[in-house]
Amino acid sequence: MFLTLENISKHYSSAGAGDRAVISHLSLQVEAGESIAIVGPSGSGKTTLLNLIGTLDTPDEGRVLYKGEDVTSYSGQRLAAFRNREIGFVFQQHHLLPQCTLLENILIPTIPIQDARLKDECIQRGQELLKRVGIWEQRHQKPGELSGGECQRAAVVRALANGPGLLLADEPTGALDQKNSGLLAELLFGLNRTDKVTLILVTHDLRLAARAGRVFLLENGRLMKRPMTP
């Protein structure tokens, strides 16, 4: 199995409210190359769940396994190296560095790579992806000179430059107009189909969610499969 969430829970404490379970004994299995959408009301824990899957946070209980290996036991440099090579992140805001060109931004994930051959492969992949998503001509421009849609496409390229097997997207179309939302959706699900990148996205957009192979509703800390019609 590519990804397994095994009975994970996450609690947060708040003044006057005590301990609150955001994720409660949640389990999920994901095959390589799948596309999964997670929907749910604001505050239901969708971003928390995505952070747990992406190893940006650790569960209070349970395990996260990638290809059968328990990555919740990783720490320090080992965890950072795993995350850099295996997981790509796309957020609602593109988080491109304003002082860097588009090309410099998408190559940032390659900086920690020590192996020269591997680094060259990742740089070449990033450049090819810029061409595929239609923003190669803008590669020497800075984010402030580009549209929101172009910046978000660049953020997807940056997430995939190192060739990760898993792409996590947190409200990736939330800051875009309808046209650019559609273009970004085509890009994400197109990469899922052609490059077999496993895609897990969190969204309020039910039309976007309906394009995924499986859709889950996160409510009261648990996932429930939700049938969707495009």
Image (cartoon, rainbow, N blue to C red):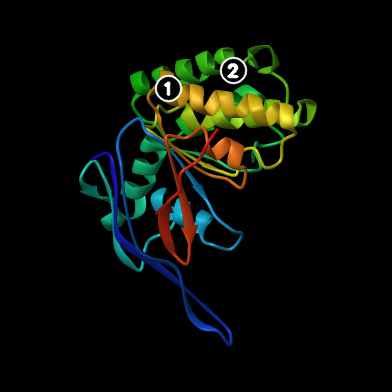
On screen, 173 above or below 49?
Answer: above
On screen, 4 above or below 11?
Answer: above
Q: How many marks?
A: 2
- The quadrant in which residue 40 appears is bottom right
**Residue 56 image position (x, y, % from top left):** 44, 53
- The quadrant in which residue 155 appears is top right
**Residue 86 image position (x, y, % from top left):** 36, 37
In the image as oriented, which residue stretches furthest toward the right?
Answer: 145
Residue 97 shown left or right of residue 186 in the figure: right
Instruction: Give the number of the disc on residue 133.
Output: 2
Residue nearest the observer in this picture, 10 or 178: 178
Instruction: Give the number of the disc on residue 193.
Output: 1
The local secondary structure at tag 2 comes to loop
Residue nearest the observer in this picture, 166 or 143: 166
Q: Amino acid at mark 2?
A: Val
Mark 2 is surrounded, within 10 Å at the Cα level, by few (under 14), some (14 to 19) or many (20 or more) other residues, namely some
In the image as oriented, which residue stretches furthest toward the left?
Answer: 68
Residue 63 shown left or right of residue 171 in the figure: left
Q: CA distance from mark 1 to mark 2?
A: 15 Å
